[in-house]
Image (cartoon, helix red, strand yellow):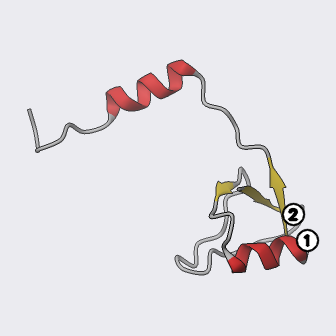
Amino acid sequence: MFIKPAPGMLIRHPVTRDLLPESGMDVDDNDRYFLQRLADRDVVKVEQPVQSATEVRSNKASSPTRGGEA
């Protein structure tokens, strides 16, 4: 599921201790921590933003090659 902090809330990721980005992040649908945050209305479930085809292609082009430098 894709979640964002509710307006005015600062929510930390339980493992990394980093703040959840305001733009949101994808988390496991069965994660008890985030399900509780959702129930407490500390986060809101939103539709995951869709990457355009050009963004996907540019991300693949800029990723490092497997097996080291070419």
* Element at label 2: loop
Residue 48: x percent and y percent? 71, 43
Residue 9: x percent and y percent? 84, 70
Indicate left or right for 44 with 27 as reference. Answer: right
* Of residues 28 and 58, the one drawn nearer to the viewer in this rendering: 28
Mark count = 2
Corner quadrant of residue 22:
bottom right
Residue 56: x percent and y percent? 48, 28
* Element at label 1: loop
Which residue type does callout 1 highlight?
Arg
Q: Are marks 1 and 2 in contact (CB under 8 Å)?
A: yes
Q: CA distance from mark 1 to mark 2?
A: 7 Å
User: What residue did someone put label 2 on?
Assistant: 6
Q: Is residue 27 above or below residue 34?
A: above
**Nearer the viewer's eye, disc 1 or disc 2?**
1
Q: Is residue 52 above or below residue 65?
A: above
Q: Can you name the residue that lies furthest to the front here?
A: 30
Residue drawn at (84%, 70%) of the image: 38
Residue drawn at (11%, 44%) of the image: 67
Residue 54: x percent and y percent? 51, 19
Say which quadrant the N terminus sits in: bottom right
Corner quadrant of residue 12:
bottom right
Mark 1 Cα-neighbour bin, 10 Å: few <14, some 14–19, many ≥20 = some
* Of residues 51 and 17, the one drawn nearer to the viewer in this rendering: 51
Residue drawn at (77%, 71%) of the image: 10
Say which quadrant the C terminus sits in: top left
Corner quadrant of residue 69:
top left
Q: Is residue 19 above or below residue 55?
A: below
Mark 2 Cα-neighbour bin, 10 Å: few <14, some 14–19, many ≥20 = some
Which residue type does callout 2 highlight?
Ala
Query: Residue 23 bears which disc, if any?
Result: none
User: What residue did someone put label 1 on?
Assistant: 41
